[in-house]
Amino acid sequence: KKLNEKPLNLKDIKFVEKPNYSIIAKMMKPTLAVVGHDVMYDADRQLWFSDIEIDTGTSYFPFVRLALVRFQPNSVEDAFISRVVLADFAQLTPDRNLAVIFDPANPKLIVVAVSGITYTNSSAEQRGSQVEVSIETRRPDVMDPAEDLGWAQVPDATFELTALVNEQGIGVWTGIVTLPEPRGSRPFRIVVKEFERFASDKDENPMVNRAKQIKGDRRVVYAETVEI
């Protein structure tokens, strides 16, 4: 499936407060629109920042590049913005919805479902991403319940979810996870990870025929934990 591509429009920016469109209209050019966002100061990092939420539609991991200016809506004509500074390119991660459903008839069974924009093939192989669910339990030697290092993976307790992708590129991964013991008998949590496949080299030796050394590899693009 070819990844969807679309230009970024003003309507794709999600505003915390409704912008002053009268000012924006005065500045509109064929390829320009300025959208003001409040900035805040991070005392720990000693940096100014602003949270900008963008609706990427059906695009998967698109790249965006921001052109940053100081925006002063209460200004004289043609002096609303400062000189433009280009930011680095950044990739936007796709949204994911995770649902965990308990089986009332069997306290050891859990239904897990993940959904969101995805792809159906890559340079590595003609398949989409993988979603795996593993089970972890608390380590008795770590007393702090907030400590992530206090969790240990249960052996032979990793499940791959089944994927289904529609024509709009929306993927749904579902599966049944079986706990080693009933819920409530001891602390458990599930770790959900999505892996994106890509092509890589088996051997870095330049004398090796590279065409014969291509293999499929993967990277984590989504991860979440849910305590049971």
Image: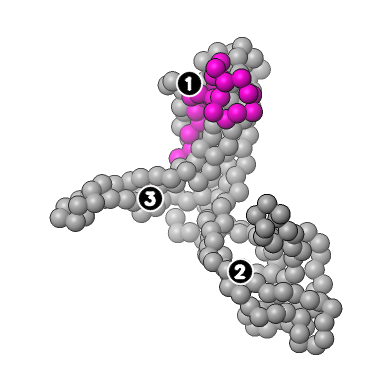
Q: Where is residue 55 in the image (x, y as percent from the top left)?
A: 65, 59
Determine which residue is flagged by label 2: 66
Determine which residue is flagged by label 3: 198
Left/right placement of residue 205 relative to residue 90 reads left
Question: Is disc 1 placed on a helix, strand or loop?
Answer: strand
Residue 207 belongs to magenta span: no
Determine which residue is flagged by label 1: 154
Q: What is the number of the mark on residue 60?
A: none
Q: Residue at the location (61% across, 11% down)?
A: 185
**Residue type at tag 1:** Val
- The quarter in which the C terminus is drawn is top right
Instruction: Specify start and end residues of the magenta stretch as a single range.
Output: 126-154
Q: Position of residue 54 (x, y in %)?
A: 65, 60
Question: Is disc 3 placed on a helix, strand or loop?
Answer: strand
Q: Residue at the location (57% across, 56% down)?
A: 92
N-terminal-most mark, 2 or 3: 2
